[in-house]
Amino acid sequence: MDLFEYQGKELLARFGIPVSTGRLVSSPDEAREAARELGGEVVVKAQVLTGGRGKAGGVKLAADPEEAAARAGEILGLDIRGHVVTRLWVETASQIASEYYLSVALDRGTGQALFMFTTQGGVEIEQVAAEAPDALVRVHVDPLEGLEPHHLRELLAGVASPGEIEQIEQIAESLYRCFVESDAMLCEINPLIVTPAGEVRALDAKVTIDDSALWRQPDIAELRDSGGGDPLEAFARERGVIYVKLDGTVGILGNGAGLSMSTVDVVVVAGGRPANFCDLGGGGSAEGVVAALEVIARDPQVHSILFNIFGGITRCDEVARGILAALEETGLSVPIVVRLDGTNAEEGRRILAEAARPNLEVEPTMLDAARRAVELAA
């Protein structure tokens, strides 16, 4: 579960991390009043669950309340990477002497928390990693050991000012507590700024909470905004489908997370771009297939659909019937390529062949199916 910037800042503030003062608004009039309350220059920031807000015109400086209202009018309604802006965060503008990047995330490979820090803050961390990898410090923290002084010394070795080091150490300790106690998967501050007066403060916040732990984080679970994320992903949750929207043209549906992720990779190897990650789960019932296809069919970017089913617990003949039932219910005309293997695979392929649907093809292997789906999506 991703938090909006303003929610992330509220969470960081609970753990004692200094953040900029601001107000949440949803209209130009409210932005004008917020700017009046805050006084001085303000920054009007789109609240959407995606990056690239600044480049898309979703972050603007305003010198006074009237300009804040004007900037709010320009930003509200913007489409930023498929997310339409309906709310804004109006905060006091900050004077910046220098910028850092600080985050702590779950490293699944090691099962440990991973701190990342660089003095090149204010830009996308992927850009720093690609262009100046030596400038990015990575420090793992064993959960059984916890955060220790030696971790912080290693992390902040590139900071010259003792005053800044002391403040960033305190913020890093608080960020780690936030990460652990909130069951987070990512707590990111970019940029972590230093003002001309020497104050260190979080100017932005990106926080992702582990969905599986929300049952023990009821106050955070209440922050979920079903309208704030991708509408297809919200619809998928309503239908009980595990779905992640991507930016390609080949819709993907598999049974089991591992097979579905492998299918995403194979589509890329075949020269295509996946439009989604969609997992039927281990059962892969006919009802599940119908629900998944209903979700995928709503994505206008999808030019073809690849079913990759391995029948273990799942029976391929049941999946085949589910595909045909889904086509009847949805009236889907997008080309569909199916690969069936495992339990009752021959029966499943026979059912699909006898149906003779004009937009349905069956391929013998995963790679063959991926190549054909990519061809049909072109």
Image (cartoon, rainbow, N blue to C red):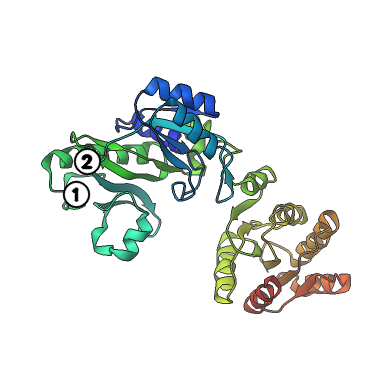
**Res 144 visible:** no
Looking at the picture, does residue 225 appear above or below residue 108?
above
Residue at the location (36% across, 34% down)? 12
Sequence-first tag of 2 and 1:
1
In terms of secondary structure, where does tag 1 sit?
A: loop
Question: Residue 177's image quarter?
Answer: top left
Q: Position of residue 276 (x, y in %)?
A: 61, 59
On residue 168, which mark appears? 2
| Crowd class of label 1 (few under 14; some 14 to 19; many from 20; radius 10 Å) | many
User: Would you say the residues marked 2 and 1 are in contact, meaning their CB atoms lie under 8 Å apart?
Assistant: yes
Q: Position of residue 165 (x, y in %)?
A: 16, 42
Is residue 329 left or right of 94 when viewed as pictured?
right
Looking at the picture, does residue 197 appear above or below residue 84?
above
Question: Mark 1 highlights which residue?
Answer: 156
Question: In terms of depth relative to the viewer, which is nearer, 268 or 74?
Answer: 74
Residue at the location (55% across, 72% down)? 268
In terms of secondary structure, where does tag 2 sit?
A: helix
**Res 190 visible:** yes
Is residue 38 left or right of 33 when viewed as pictured?
left
Mark pair 2, 1: CA separation: 8 Å
Q: Position of residue 180 (x, y in %)?
A: 36, 40
- The type of residue carrying mark 2 is Ile
Q: Position of residue 351 (x, y in %)?
A: 84, 70
Residue at the location (66% across, 65% down)? 312
Image quadrant occupied by the C terminus: bottom right
On residue 104, which mark appears? none
Is residue 39 left or right of 219 when viewed as pictured?
left
Question: Residue 316's image quarter?
Answer: bottom right
Question: In terms of depth relative to the viewer, which is nearer, 164 or 352?
Answer: 164
| Crowd class of label 2 (few under 14; some 14 to 19; many from 20; radius 10 Å) | many
